[in-house]
Amino acid sequence: MRLFFILLLLSLILWIDGQSGNFPDCKSGPLSFFPICNQSLPSRERAADLISRMTTIEKISQTITTADSIPRLGLPKYEWWSEALHGLAFSPGVFFGGDLPAASSFPMPINLGATFNMNLVYRIASIISTEARAFNNDGRAGLTFFTPNINIFRDPRWGRGQETPGEDPFLTSQYVYALIQGLQRGDDERYLKIAANCKHFDAYDLENWNGTDRHHFNAKVTDQDLVETYLPSFKSCIKDAQVASIMCSYNSINGIPACAHKFLLETIARESFHLNGFVVSDCNAISDILHAHRYTSSVEDTVAVALHAGTDLECGVFYLFHMSTALNRKKIVEADIDQALMRTFDVLIRLGWFDPPEQQIYRKLNKNNVDTLEARQLSLISAQESIVLLKNINKILPLNLNQLMNKKIALIGPTADATVTMQGIYHGRAPFLIDPITGFKNVTAGNFIDIQHARGCGISSHNEKDFAAAIKLAQSSDIVFFFGGIDNTIEREGTDRTIITLPEVQLALIQQLEKVSRSPLHVVIMSGGGIDLSYIRNSTQCGSLIWMGYPGQSGGLAVASVVFGQYNPAGRLPVTLYPGSYVNAVSMFDMQMRPSSTNPGRTYKFYTGQAVYEFGYGLSYTTFNYTYNNNTFKSFVSMKSLLKNINKEDRTIISSIRINVTNTGDMDGDDVVLAYVTPPTINNDSVVPFKQLFGFERIHLKQNETKEVFFPFTIAAALTIAENASKWIHPGLYHIIIGQQRMLSITLEGESIQWA
């Protein structure tokens, strides 16, 4: 944290000193005479010439995220670290003010995972990158953004799980592909719109638990879990979406610090996934190699091991202070520095940083492209689509406005008036924040409904006066809502939870409200990580239960629109909600996904216990019926027929699955159709998943309308990862599950095939 503020101060000085000239001058400046400004040359050739003109000291000054200017070359200062997880966020490179006091604040990624709508993710990312360019043109942001976080949410205690789309590798892979397309691609294919950064590579999902923090943690990961769980999202990001950069993480993986892990950074990221861009360290992670992990014994060895592993850029100052020593002591050569700078400057060239502004449509974006009507509408839609209805006894929801005239509704609890809390973490200054109270009042306006609020308790604390006031309000109200959950005092970067139950004070208040409420209690939960909601699920006095995540600037209006039936919920849980006892059953240090004597298994794929609510669960106000069309479906497939595709991509289709979905209820609405496969159990093989997601689609259906959904059952869906990380296709029966319903089976006949 101290380093963050030092870098923030350096960045503020950089911004004040250089905001009016934050682009190189390739028209009349010193650079204009050099190949760096020759747009007809390949980007690597342009970068190589620029680097060749730098002195050694000047080169070193460019190896950290707060890169200094080189006046004699006309190279301005540049801050590499900007943030845009779900909208432009406070960070060393992003400044709010002047004509740009705010930026759109969308729901957290955990919410976007709950939408299962990748077109929505793409549209949000496109707006974020447009606003980023507008800020950059005003000197208020960089062009390189350290987003997204695509680590797998393997343990509910992890404080940063809210930054991810959930626990499933397939969902996360689809999410990051859509996101990177929206962030990096736009109307001008010549340039990157912005440069995104997939983090944290790899196996990072612990902040500070049981005396060990992320700077010291050694993640012991099996080859099987690495290939099956921890790498797929990065493969999607790097190989498929072609992200411009990745970030190596704080932790070690099997004894080697991530930023010194040549196998991960070079063999996997660059050689296997074909990374076309740079690797940046997490902030102070280079220093951690020496001082936290004690992997090296000197500063010069630390610089060398990181640089040789492929860490091109440092968030921190270790390279700046110690690279000269490593060079003088011959631990590195100048060509090592040149290679790192080649990768970073190549990205800046691809962003158009050196090219004339009049030739670039992105350079024309301004304040009129920020907080637009489209952005506001999308912030509401995305929040609505992310809301998950978990319980709805006797169809108590939606509430009918016409039947509530002159009624009183009590909104009780610590998140009923939440504003900034709705933004989660890594947020910026939103143009507005609609809390649930305001949302309820807006939706009920003109219906003579009295909306009253009493806090009752804090997230984890209370006083008797507030408690009594809440009970008194509930007694006099016709309908009572409890808004609770957790916030970033409990889950955030640097802080993991030790328990996953609802805070005791909230549960006590819920139980008191149940006793005095005239009608069944409604509960709305705000959180990123999963919470044990078994009491609310089981209570006959609780009529409905809603999870709203961290829904962003329009969150209060979104949940109100769901409650009163203006929007039919269709969100699905992107994580498993475990019982509270789960934290006693497995150590957070245990990275293994499969069950063992000390681990009940992780995520819906391997958890052997009874979940409170399963991954993918979510209710609607209407009903849907699934039938399958077998015209294109092959139920028997010869393994020999697959051999001709053995050297091709895993997307080769084995069989085509077409599902007819019909809205059989009395309300228009969305349905999220989830397709899972249960692979056959193979003798002497390790545990296979109970089921695994291989397809999903969100569709909108009017009453009595039917639509067809197509899922290709591909080789990737059929693959089993062995203990040695080899990929196999085994013969046997593959059950296809659509939603909660086992609908089809595919038999693969023949001998097992090792795919890779």
Image (tube, rainbow, N blue to C red):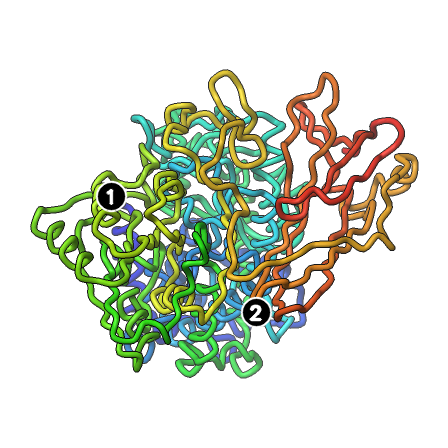
Give the quarter of the image for residue 33. Answer: bottom right
Q: Is residue 517 left or right of 710 when viewed as pictured?
A: left
Most foreground residue, 59 or 151: 151
Q: Is residue 142 left or right of 627 when viewed as pictured?
A: left
Q: Position of residue 524 (x, y in %)?
A: 34, 54
Q: Name the quadrant of the C terminus.
A: top right
Give the quarter of the image for residue 715. Answer: top right
Q: Residue at x 67, y 41 (%)?
A: 271
Q: Mark 2 Cα within 10 Å, few/some/many (few <14, many 20+)?
A: some
Q: Is residue 218 visible?
A: yes
Most foreground residue, 714 or 10: 714
Give the quarter of the image for residue 540. Answer: top left
Q: CA separation, marks 2 and 1? A: 35 Å
Find disc 1 in the rendering and name its residue: 511
Q: Mark 1 Cα within 10 Å, few/some/many (few <14, many 20+)?
A: some
Most foreground residue, 495 or 638: 638
Q: Position of residue 18 (x, y in %)?
A: 33, 69
Q: Name the quadrant of the N terminus.
A: top left
Most foreground residue, 360 or 623: 623
Q: Is residue 450 above or below residue 383?
A: below
Seen as rendered, the residue at the extreme left is 465
Q: Position of residue 702 (x, y in %)?
A: 62, 71
Q: Is residue 372 above or below residue 736?
A: below
Find disc 2 in the rendering and name its residue: 668
Q: Amino acid at mark 2?
A: Asp
First of labels 2, 1 by sequence position: 1
